[in-house]
Image: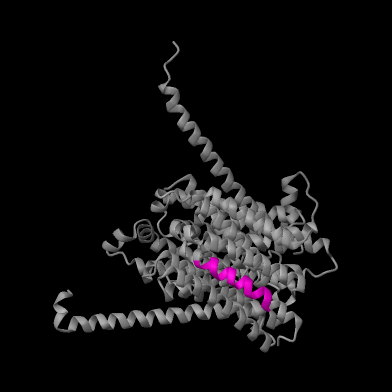
Amino acid sequence: MTSLVAALSLNPVTDLEQMTEYPFMVNALWAGTIVAVMAGAIGWFMVLRRQTFAGHTLAVTAFPGAAAATFVGLPLAVGYFGACGLGALLLAAVGRDGGSDAADESAAIGTLQAFGLGLGYLFVVLYGGQLSSLEALLFGSFLGITEGQVQALLWIAAAALAVLVVIGRPLLFASVDGAVARAANVPTRALGFGFLVLLALAVAATAEITGALLVFALLVTPAATAQRLTARPGPGIVISVALALAVTWVGLTIAFFSPYPVGFWVTSLSFGVYVAVRLGELIVRRAAVAVPGAHADPEPT
Amino acid sequence: MLGHEFMRHAFLAGTFVALACGLIGYFVVLRAQVFAGDALSHVAFTGALAAAAAGVDVRLGLFVATVGVAVGMGLLGRRARPDDVVIGSVFAWILGLGVLFLSIFTTSSSGSNGTAAVRVLFGSILGLSAADARLAAAIAALAVVGLLVLARPLLFSTVDPDVARGLGVPVRGIGIAFLALLGLVAAEGTQAIGALMLLGLLAAPGAAARLLTFRPWWGLLLSGAIAVGSMWLGLVLSYEINSLPASTAIVGVAALAYVAAGAVDLLRRGGRRAAGELAQAGPQGSLGS
């Protein structure tokens, strides 16, 4: 992964100017922003619905899609979205409402994922692909994002978020208590399928930037952190989006000034925040245990 | 075909690795820990690249990383069954680390074009030397023996952990030992079919076996047999078809076996339902509602 090393000055304004001088960097920042908002919001529902493994598998199916598109000569985006859409259909077919239990479902998902990766490798071999393109497909690259891609991302994100706003409330209900929602005539099955399609959209868009393997950094970790901080949906989604945004911006900036890949920085930053929150929780809990104990002690005076 | 030395090595290592994957995979599916297996296979990638970047033997990095993380997950998780979201967050970061090592490795070894990464990700079963193959087979055989020793209490504590605990079975310790074994097998499988496709050989045979039979010992046997069969058929296919990579062929056969098992299950269920309807339509049908 090539990364250009620019000199970092201590003045943030000149640093920002230096970064935005390059059009590719401006595109990367815009694309990162759009993707982070979408991934943060949809990821929150994914974590709530415990569909992390499904999300990861969708992310991984982005790889064969992109590899197939490269092989056939179609635009990469077609491959990403096509494969993720197909993945969502297959996942819905083996899904939880299909009558199989959790163990069988996860085994089916795992098989699907390995098979998809096998296909992806086959396409790469058939293409006689260079390693650099393989690496970009798997681990992402923020260097080659065009203005057209940014615009496409914007439309996709707007559409996905609009759908999420419309189905958000019943989806929340169905996710928190499926049985009660079903009894109240909420179409849980249709919602589950619709959400998988949304997830596929978000994953495909994220994979274009972060690569198939690192989608999780924006999709899971910020949402998991947010759900540690609050159980309320509104503030939770806001925190999740804010974290994803912060991680993307800071990650891109550090990657611009350092020789190491953006994927590493983004994953490390989001994981760092997650660990910090877990540690904070631990300390707060200790304190909460200590306080009643202190009250129970007889006062000295 | 077996006249070629590399094919003989591939069959030797492949048979034992597949057997280990198939046997442990049955328990992975039974314990619903496929996602943990997935995470471990990605850990294998990072471990191998870290070793490559540091210039030590790749296998050392593989085994240390997978077994270490497996035991860590077991210790952190409640009842030695780590939570999905925790696994997801941890392994996103571990993959990020892998990317870092990859970039360090490719920049430090400027001459070589970094095929090590491809080997780790997608396997290199056709490129094993005699010594590699023998070592891989030996370690896999060791893992199989370890699993068989553990199998009975493991099955008990998987099916009914509360009762097992009540009878003095060390459920938590067994869970951790199982994860450590899984780490070992993940490192083995990574050398054969690659970190990314390992899951195919772990999940698909086990899932297929579970669809075909409810009896655990038959299932275990069947799972091992399906894995070994997939390995053999996959190797033959990739030998016959020039552009088909071995890992893709092996995982493809395993996935097909799973789909076939699913079809058998559907047919059987359909048959049972038809029989049920027949019984209802018969003179004793009034028993049904």
Residue A263, image x, y percentages: 67, 59
Residue nearest the viewer, comparing A92 with B238: B238
Q: Which residues are magenta?
A: B11-26
Check the image and report above or below for A160 versus B254.
above
Please name the residue shown 45% across and 59% down the image.
B158
Asked whether, in this view, residue B24 is left or right of residue B281, the answer is right
Q: Residue A162 lies in what quarter of the image?
A: bottom left
* Farthest right residue in view: B111
Check the image and report above or below for B218 versus B28.
below
Q: Residue B58 lies in what quarter of the image?
A: bottom right
Please name the residue shown 51% across and 80% down the image.
B257
The answer to whether residue B14 is magenta is yes
> Is any part of residue B64 visible from this angle?
yes
Split into 4 quadrants, where in the image is the N terminus of chain B?
Answer: bottom right
Residue nearest the viewer, comparing A29 with B217: B217
The answer to whether residue A184 is magenta is no
Split into 4 quadrants, where in the image is the C terminus of chain B?
Answer: bottom left
> Is any part of residue A214 visible from this angle?
no
Residue A124, image x, y percentages: 68, 78
User: Which is the main secondary structure of the residues drawn in magenta?
Assistant: helix
Numbered marks: total: 0
Residue B253, image x, y percentages: 56, 81
